Amino acid sequence: MSLLNRLNDDMKQAMKNKEKEKLSVIRMLKASLQNEAIKFGKQELSEDEELTVLSREVKQRKDSLHEFTKAGREDLAEKIQTELTYVEIYMPKQLSEEEVSAIVQETMVEVGASSKADMGKVMGAIMPKVKGKADGALVNKLVLQHLS
């Protein structure tokens, strides 16, 4: 089942259950996916493109959550946290830190990385492997640890 079909089904269910917040988030996700499809001139996005849109939405919410928390706006932080919870439902299962670390080590061997100067090469090889399954900040941190 494509993500758009899943969102449509969940949207109908949210309407029936009168879940306003969930409905709002689903509509926002659908709009983001449709805008991306229009941008690329396609009828449907590939799974990879859908994952890119979802990752972008999660990152935006996490950034907003961080800013609102830092500014002491707990009311807004709580709203964003709820949205983030709904968006993450549609993301693939996230890799654990140990799994990401194993991928980092494996990739470093593949590209022959040995110093911090190889950081870009390693990151460029890793990110397509963990796209949507691991946070970029975590990957960056682990690559730095292993290159040190």
Image (spheres, rainbow, N blue to C red):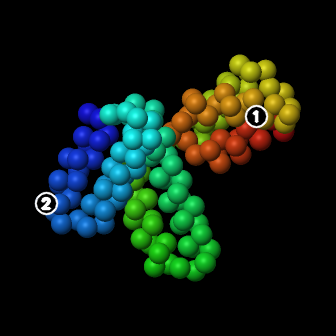
Mark sitting on residue 16: 2
Q: Quadrant of residue 46?
A: top left
Q: Quadrant of residue 143?
A: top right
Q: Position of residue 100 (x, y in %)?
A: 60, 36
Residue at 51 percent across and 49 percent down: it is 56
Per the model, the C-alpha gap separating discs 2 and 1 is 49 Å
Pointer 2 local density, CA inside 10 Å: few below 14, some 14–19, many at least 20:
few
Q: Is residue 24 left or right of residue 98?
A: left
Q: Position of residue 57 (x, y in %)?
A: 47, 52
Q: Position of residue 77 (x, y in %)?
A: 49, 72
Q: Is residue 6 left or right of residue 46?
A: left
Residue contact at pointers 2 and 1, CB within 8 angstroms? no
Mark sitting on residue 22: none
Residue at 44 percent across and 36 percent down: it is 40
Residue 30 lies, with reference to residue 81, above or below; the image says above
Q: Is residue 139 left or right of residue 92?
A: right
* Residue 33 in view here: no
Q: Which residue is mark 1?
A: 120
Residue at 45 percent across and 67 percent down: it is 80
Q: Position of residue 82 (x, y in %)?
A: 39, 65
- Mark 2 or mark 1, earlier in chain: 2
- For mark 2, give the secondary structure: helix
